[in-house]
Amino acid sequence: MIWQLLLVALALGAAYYRWSRRRLYKLAAEIPCLPHSYPVIGHAHIFAGSNEGKLVVVVVRWCWARRTTAGRAGASTGSRPRYRAYRTATLSSDTHTSSLVAMKVNFSCGSLVLGAAYYRWSRRRLYKLAAEIPCLPDSYPVIGHAHIFAGSNEDIMQVLQKIGRISNQHEGLTSFWLANRLCVGMTDPAAIEVVSKSCLDKDENVAKIFRTAIGNGSLFAPVNIWYPRRKINAPFFNRKNLDQMVPVFDSKSSIMADLLRTEAGGGDFPIWKYVTTFTFDTVCETALNTEINMQKCSDHDYLLRAIDKCTQVMAKRMFHPWLHPDFIYKRLPVYKRYRHHLQRAYTFLEENIRKKKEKITESGLKNFKNNNELSHFIDVVIQSSGGLEKGYSDMELREELLVFMVAGSDTSATAVSYTTVLLSRYPAVQDKVYQELYEVFGASDRTVTAEDLPKLTYLEAVVKESLRLYPPVPIVLREVHGDTLLPSGTTLVDETTVMFNIWGTHRNPAYWAPDAEEFRPERFLRGPLPHPAMFVPFSHSVRNCLG
């Protein structure tokens, strides 16, 4: 509606502008015009160059003026008549030039109106879809709802929560505009299941932002690259190998527990620094077979800070359309800082890749399929992709390792932190977890084994309830290519961006009961959930998180 009003106003303004200058246009039609006139600028381009060149142009104009005013000048050859003829010609020519400029401006306005009309006509199905789905308030011309995403990452998260709540109030669907992009917020599990299976492409505008860091890493790779890479990476996450990781998790978590004891009895304290170093130590050992011991040593703190800064910058850019064009973003100071942090992460990974390849060249590569020990991610993907000669290049290895490090450490740290905070706020739940741990381990201080994990059913329910209320990945964006019919009867059309609002889906009272906002782990002890897509902390269907 706003675009229609703007187009009508522009058309009426152009028509009035032409009508108010109708006598100039009439005069312009009566007087011979110089050649080579262009829209908007008219003949102004002929005056470019040196003063000598401009003098030649003036002489040409004088000759042209004499020809057109010969009848009025008569046969007189005196200096005064020639001067009068030149002055008259100059006045006529200036008026003529102004009128031509006005004509070209009017022509340009008309072209702009026609172009805008065609643009709207070509996107008519998008506008029709936007009219069918409840839209967020406070939309403005050109920018749409982009202004509501201004502010810090915390402010953006509050906006995403608001979108989730509004969507839950309108049967799981809502719409909003990010500049010229129509986004459909989705919290209905049935709709999420349909889109997650039929639309595998990540939103291209967002994907290109993250590709500046991870390239074609499987997290945001196009489908034709993502599919073969997923098959190469998948063997690392088989059950046998995951069980082999438990001793690593146990040893690293024991270090964190010892460090946390120093905070006991001292009141509230931030837990994030303890959890992030724990998860980063774990990821580096399981992925790279490298012990950096960040929990006890600060030598690699720069690496954690670099990755954290990069992810914050990319997350903020994602919701600010004015930062999407590279020719703008690359000229901002934040881009230089971003590249600096990113290069530090690249250097760390490239050094580890070089050392790993040297070691494989010397001692050979173990077959992870016949290995009873932990197979590290870098070893698995080198072998699965074809070995040193035919497998992943150094750049492809760096891309996948960076995805593993960022996705593995940050999301795990977020989940552990929120779970710990929730346990501190709900003493009754904490007592139940303690009782279950005591039943499995007793008073012993033995290590945790893979066989112990299935016995910790209540702890698993606590973790799931934490992931439900505070999913580490609150949204997932997909791009629609072709018509996609939703269970509600709404048809998504080409060029629609779909936002799986996981935060809102996990709090949808239609599926989680009226107490969806409450922390109640028992809801995960009642058996299978009514719908498989109502709990999707790491996305859903074939393009979910492998780990």
Image (tube, rainbow, N blue to C red):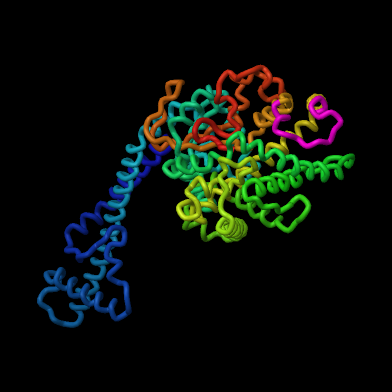
The answer to whether 151 appears left or right of 137 in the picture is: right
Picture layout, residue 370 above or below residue 437: below
At 74% from the left and 44% from the top, the residue drawn is 252
Main secondary structure found in the magenta portion: loop
Q: Quadrant of the C terminus?
A: top right
Q: Position of residue 445 (x, y in %)?
A: 84, 36
Quarter of the rendering containing residue 38: bottom left
Q: Position of residue 187 (x, y in %)?
A: 55, 27
Q: Position of residue 542 (x, y in %)?
A: 49, 33
* Residue range (magenta): 437-454
Picture layout, residue 345 above or below residue 406: below
Q: Position of residue 130 (x, y in %)?
A: 44, 31
Residue 352 within the segment the image draws in magenta: no
At 33% from the left and 37% from the top, the residue drawn is 121
The answer to whether 153 appears left or right of 127 in the picture is: right
Quarter of the rendering containing residue 181: top left
Looking at the picture, tell me which residue is in the foreground, 353 or 5. 353
Looking at the picture, tell me which residue is in the foreground, 208 or 81. 208
Q: Is residue 519 visible?
A: no
